[in-house]
Image: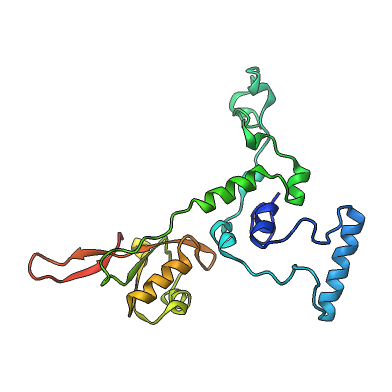
Amino acid sequence: MLDLEYGLPVQVRDSALNISTTDAIPQSDVNREYFAEEHDRKGRAGLDYESSFGKAQPNDLLLKLQRTTPYYKRNRAHICSFFVRGECTRGAECPYRHEMPITGELAHQNFKDRYYGVNDPVAKKMMRLAAEMPSLEAPEDTSIKTLWVGGVDSRITEEDLKDKFYAYGEIESIRLITPRSCAFITYTTREDAEKATEGLANKLIVKGIRLRLDWGRPKQEGIEGGKRREEGRC
């Protein structure tokens, strides 16, 4: 049971947007329907909402966890109860899944709790993983001001990358290497490059595609001279 906009459990969305489950939201189906109709009417009339709904903007947690691809697991067949007991005789022809049920905390999920966004073990696990996501550590060499972007495909253009990264400072150059699924963004200053990593690390999404971000790594350009180029891992 996921939020339609972000593809995340309701509890994750509410925690990220600081929405309380008691934020004047009725619990009965009849009152919830009336509540929704009232907000829809106010929206059409251009009136401001008194609650936090309609005002909250996506934050770091939502950007880190937001799904960018469909969640197909929800459409899977149920687990074969005969297989669990070791009694299924249909083999590959069985329309149900031949695997053992999940055990542990995630096995005890209450759909009502997930619907209202409370006591959701899946949401708690996702928020814990988000908190443990590592941040990008800037290299000691302060002359490095190039960022590496991975996961780039033919749908992403140089202009798309410029639109995403220009907000953090002046860009010196953009090298898009689509055959190798990567790009290099070089800023005019190290400070701007650091701003970009702080603002986009673990939450870089372009055209609905989640991309990876890292610092460019210096690579020697021949054995003579001290010249080098800042490249990552393409």
Q: Position of residue 94 (x, y in %)?
A: 64, 28
Q: In which quarter of the image is residue 74?
A: top right
Task: Name which residue lies at 78% across and 44% down.
Answer: 112
Task: Name which residue lies at 79% across and 61% down.
Answer: 23
User: Which quadrant would the C terminus be assigned to in this image?
Assistant: bottom left
How many callouts does the rendering have? 0
Q: Position of residue 65 (x, y in %)?
A: 56, 56
Q: Nearer the viewer, residue 24 or 216?
A: 24
Q: Quadrant of residue 36?
A: bottom right
Task: Name which residue lies at 81% across and 75% down.
Answer: 43
Q: Position of residue 51 (x, y in %)?
A: 79, 68
Residue lying furthest left: 224
Task: Name which residue lies at 41% across and 80% down.
Answer: 169
Q: Nearer the viewer, residue 14 or 109?
A: 14
Q: Is residue 46 left or right of residue 86?
A: right
Q: Is residue 96 left or right of residue 143?
A: right
Q: Is residue 75 visible?
A: no
Q: Where is residue 113 in the image (x, y as percent from the top left)?
A: 75, 45
Q: Can residue 152 be seen in this view?
A: yes
Q: Quadrant of residue 224?
A: bottom left
Q: Which colour scheme is used?
A: rainbow
